[in-house]
Image: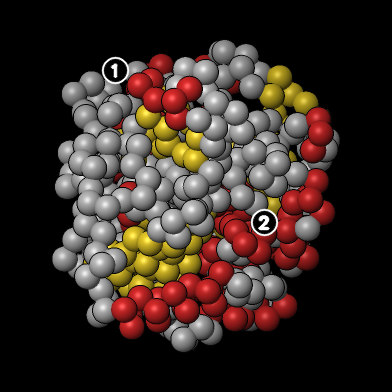
Amino acid sequence: MCNYHITSLLGYLLFGALVRLHAGTRLNLVCLTPLVSLLQTPMKKTKELIGEAGATFVNAFTVTPLCCPSRSSILTGRYPHNHEVRNNSLSGNCSSVQWQQGPEALAFPVYLSKQKYQTFFGGKYLNQYGRKDAGDVSHVPPGWDQWNALVGNSQYYNYTLSVNGKAEQHGDSYEKDYLTDLILNRSLSFLDDRSPQHPFFIMLAPPAPHSPWTAAPQYQKEFSNVQAPRDGSFDKPGKVLHFTLNQNALPLRWQALLSVDDMVEKLVKKLDSIKELNNTYIFYTSDNGYHTGQFSLPIDKRQLYEFDIRIPLLVRGPGIKPNQTIKAPVLNIDLAPTFLDISGVNLSTANMDGQSFLAQMAPSLRNGTVRPFFLVEYTGEGNPTKDPTCPKLGPGVSQCFPDCVCEDAFNNTYACVRTLDGKQDLQYCEFADSESFVEVYNLTSDPHQLENIVKKVDPAILQAMNQRLIKLQSCVGDSCRNIK
């Protein structure tokens, strides 16, 4: 049997994995996750070296549109209601002791380590990682051999890394400290120093292009004329939306991504030089989407709409024909079981809600089925006291911009069934609020989700969607894949 090496680059929104394939040996994996969509970005090298060399998934989604819960889903292959990370706060279980003692101990690196993988992590892990009340920098999650994790949230300079459990301080020198380049260089050294007798897994998680959107010096003048896309929902309130809260940070984000594009190119060249490129799966995706003015929302990613839950996904590797476009829905909870499937782990031994999509991109290697619907869920964050700059709003809101426009609130807690089966393209969402508010969209006729059609839909269809949602919200493992 063949097993694959995996190298992963995990930036803020895009994710990738490279897997080395050797006859009679295990495969390597590499993962990348920066912050914006690939189909409309400066990521030309990435699109060519991964997408055109393999498969582009045009219906890839996150099961929750915020950093820490989504990254926790990537690591565990579980929906948020099963890994119980609700938001980016420590009280929301982000990198908490409870997370460390439970879901983190069963994350996919643990399984890869048992398969004798040599594992490397570099970059942003979870937003609250490294806090003193959550294990400090000495906590190294199980399964990782080489650990270079950013303490706290996204920074490009003046940060602290946990390097194999010891604090390493960094300043503001581009040559020595720029995080995107630093973790790339350390991953290249890891490849040089690895044992060729065992497979490897590399996950690189550059914060780019998360705020503060700090570009490398050579890219700070790029895209000066670029503006946020003015699509169908830009600066429009929509009709009968539960939570509608214009700011343009797109050029800065694109500038920061150019170093990620360089990262992909250098990794691919390195794999080629060590004669591993043709034996490697490379995944490039994201932990969430992003909005810049859609529905008059300023800039963030906590909503149920397509612009926040759709993510890019490109994969190349053995058995994957080039220039494929794959329409089957794929979720971020499917990444972990796909890695384990590639590595030779029996998936029945891993209690994951997702499913391997190896069969979708390499049908000559696997048989598999396509899921027709899935769950998206989020627990809103709010402040228990009033924002002094917006007292009329009262308590319960958060992430507020000037003029009291807020991106989140306690009542922005929702669960959705997203149906995408080739015949129907629907979204049904219920809010956990005093109104039991419901939103329904037909994305075939209304791709920008401008009209909530809940009052126009056959009540029998609403009831069927409600029952499906109830089952999804309580599903665990196999039951998440077997709901009718």
Q: Are marks 1 and 2 in contact (CB under 8 Å)?
A: no
Q: Is residue 41 left or right of residue 200?
A: left
Tell me the element at label 2: loop
Picture quadrant of residue 107: bottom right
Residue 363 locus on image (x, y percent): 42, 81
Q: Is residue 374 left or right of residue 132?
A: left
Q: Nearer the viewer, residue 180 or 68?
A: 68
- Disc nearest the viewer among 1 and 2: 2
Q: Residue at x 48, y 67 (%)?
A: 375
Q: Nearer the viewer, residue 291 or 7?
A: 291
**Residue 78 appears in view:** yes
Cα distance, mark 1 to mark 2? 42 Å
Q: Is residue 162 left or right of residue 456?
A: right
Residue 398 locus on image (x, y percent): 51, 33
398 above or below 218?
below
**Residue 260 appears in view:** no
Q: Nearer the viewer, residue 263 or 455?
A: 455
Residue carrying label 1? 221
Amino acid at circle 1: Lys
Amino acid at circle 2: Glu
Residue carrying label 2? 84
Q: Residue at x 74, y 33 (%)?
A: 130
Q: Residue at x 35, y 21 (%)?
A: 403
Task: Mark 2: give few (<14), some (14-19) or many (20+) Cα within 10 Å.
Answer: some
Q: Residue at x 21, y 29 (%)?
A: 227
Residue 109 locus on image (x, y percent): 70, 58
Tell me the element at label 1: loop
Q: Nearer the viewer, residue 214 or 353?
A: 353
